């Protein structure tokens, strides 16, 4: 049993910043890739950023230079620093992680419940 819990969302004005966190807990053996997705009302969920187990990040073009993904393996946590926020960044942000449990040969991709980010004047 593994759980992912996001935090750090909120309401900010354009140009503002937030730091989103996602902590994994439970029967964790190995965490491979982790990522952040977002879903705005009426739109499909999209990948925003991902990070490999070795710490190599990737970003969708619309957030390059503004968002930074990082991870703390000791804390089983992935972060997304979101700067220079725009109204179009408004969405529910979800974390995702490929986790293999202790003593298990394979594991699924897990999703968190999401945290709301609202950017408006």
Image: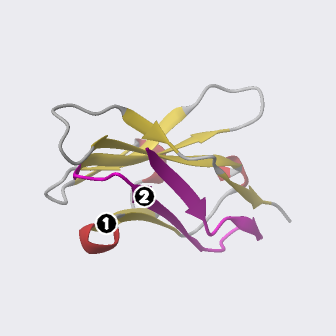
* Residue picked out by circle 1: 71
Magenta region, mostly helix, strand or loop? strand
Q: CA distance from mark 2 to mark 1?
A: 11 Å
- Looking at the image, is 4 positioned above or below residue 46? below
Residue at horizontal 19%, vertical 60%? 55
Classify mark 1: helix, strand or loop: strand
Question: Is the C-beta separation of discs 2 and 1 under 8 Å?
Answer: no
Specify whether 40 is left or right of 8. right
Q: Nearer the viewer, residue 91 or 77?
A: 77
Residue at horizontal 42%, vertical 58%? 24
Q: Earlier in the sequence, mark 2 or mark 1?
A: 2
- Looking at the image, is 91 positioned above or below residue 26? above
Give coordinates of residue 63: x percent, y percent.
47, 52
Residue 3 within the magenta-colored segment of the rendering: yes
- Looking at the image, is 97 positioned above or below residue 21? above
Quarter of the image with the N terminus is: top left
Residue at horizontal 34%, vertical 31%? 108
Give the number of the disc on residue 53: none
Picture quadrant of residue 38: top right
Residue 108 within the magenta-colored segment of the rendering: no
Few, some or many residues within 10 Å of mark 1 (<14, 14–19, 20+): many
Classify mark 2: helix, strand or loop: strand
Give the magenta part as a residue range: 1-30
Specify whether 109 is left or right of 52. right
Q: Nearer the viewer, residue 14 or 18?
A: 18
Q: Nearer the viewer, residue 61 or 34?
A: 34
Question: Which color scheme does this rendered protein use?
Answer: secondary structure
* Residue picked out by circle 2: 24
């Amino acid at each position: 049993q593994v759980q992912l819990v996001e935090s750090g969302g909120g309401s900010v004005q354009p140009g503002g910043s937030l730091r989103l966190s996602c902590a994994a807990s439970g029967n964790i053996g190995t965490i491979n890739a982790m990522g952040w997705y977002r879903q705005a009302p009426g739109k499909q969920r999209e990948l925003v950023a991902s990070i490999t187990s070795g710490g190599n990040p990737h970003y969708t073009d619309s957030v390059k230079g503004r968002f930074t993904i990082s991870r703390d393996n000791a804390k089983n946590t992935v972060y997304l620093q979101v700067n220079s926020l725009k109204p179009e960044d408004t969405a529910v942000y979800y974390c995702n992680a490929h986790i293999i449990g202790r003593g298990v040969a394979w594991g699924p991709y897990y999703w968190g419940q999401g945290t709301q980010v609202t950017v408006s004047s």
